[in-house]
Amino acid sequence: MRKKLVFLLVTLFVAGSLLIGCGTAQQPAVTEEKPAEEKPIEEKPAAVEKKQISILTGSTGGTYFALGGSMANTWNNYSELVQVTSQPSGASVENMNRLHAGEVELGMAMNNIADDAWNGRGAFKEKQQNFRTVAVIYPEVYQGVALADSKINSLADVKGKRVAVGPVGSGTVVLTEAVFAEAGLTFNDVKAAYDGFGDASGKMKDGHLDAAFNVLSVPAAAITDIQLTREINIIEIGDELYSKIKAKHPFFSQYIIPAGTYGNKEDVKTINCQAALYVQKDVPEEIVYELTKIWVEKAGEVANAHGAAKWLSDELAAGNKDALLAGLTTPLHKGAYKYFQEQGIAVPEAIKPID
């Protein structure tokens, strides 16, 4: 009996062990899937806000004003860095004063006026050197025009006449004063009006002025506009007077206005300097580099909008890149210099950057 009891207990133990073993068999672990992490949406880089800058030009009706507007439009079409606004002004002298004062970033000026500013001569009592040079824009031609019925056929004939000598603060008025001086005249010898050529041409058409002088491209639209209603004469600066001017003002060259330009039957001799682009010295290098590059490489597009740029476009098309620096005497901005170096343009030692 005892043996049967022991056998029964052993049998129950073994059976229980088997059941327990089966019940504890490991089930495959269930891995709880975590939701995929959402990647943050990458923000597109914000568009670079263009820096707002201004270029000072000249009086309305003059070449600077119209050409400066065309240059600004071209820069705005291609620049990734700046938005340029064109502003009228009293032209060269005012532009150099305001560049020196840091009031604007860009200015157009005659190269002789820029040299005067740098050296503290002429209209500048002190050296003004807070500007740097970018490039030549076009040859500036000094042009005197008179109404045919005023009987002004030469510079000597302006005595006692109503004459526009250029706006106060402009390179034109400085140049006119110098030309008059070499011809033995002063502004006291005429009834001087300090008008820009836009105003002067209107007054000539209305008969309120006899003659006007200005520095313009050839042909000048403001002069041809006078011809629509009045007959005119172009006042010549002959060889003898030119020699006197050249002796004291070496920046100037003799220029021939071809016959037929303004209805003139023969060539007319006068003088010219260079219109150039200047920049406030603290404008960043990358901005001046881009402005220089666009001006040089898109000069043809500017010429389509204003004929004054055609001269540079033609010179560059002919391979004459040196025209970009002809007649310049003040130091280049390092941004412009970098571009000229890349283009293999030889930069005279005298105008290499100083900072």
Image (cartoon, rainbow, N blue to C red):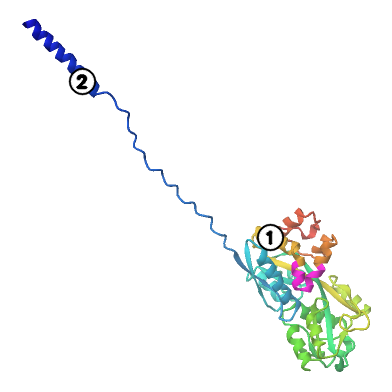
* In the foreground, 126 or 116: 116
Look at 38% across and 43% down and name the residue there. Answer: 35
Q: Which residues are magenta?
A: 301-311
User: Quarter of the image holding residue 16?
Assistant: top left
| The C terminus, quarter of image | bottom right
* In the foreground, 196 or 231: 231
SS for dot 1: helix
Q: Is residue 353 magenta?
A: no
Look at 45% across and 49% down and name the residue there. Answer: 40
Amino acid marked by disc 2: Leu
Work out whether mark 2 precedes mark 1 in sequence or the reverse, and give the earlier one. Answer: 2
* Main SS, magenta residues: helix
Residue 54 place in picture, x, y as percent: 64, 70
**Dot 2 surroundings within 10 Å: few (below 14), some, or many (20 or more)?**
few
Image-based side of 318 in relation to 5, left or right: right
* In the foreground, 168 or 147: 147
Residue 271 place in picture, x, y as percent: 86, 76
SS for dot 2: helix
| The N terminus, quarter of image | top left
One can see residue 260 in this view: yes
The residue labelled by disc 1 is 290
The residue labelled by disc 2 is 19
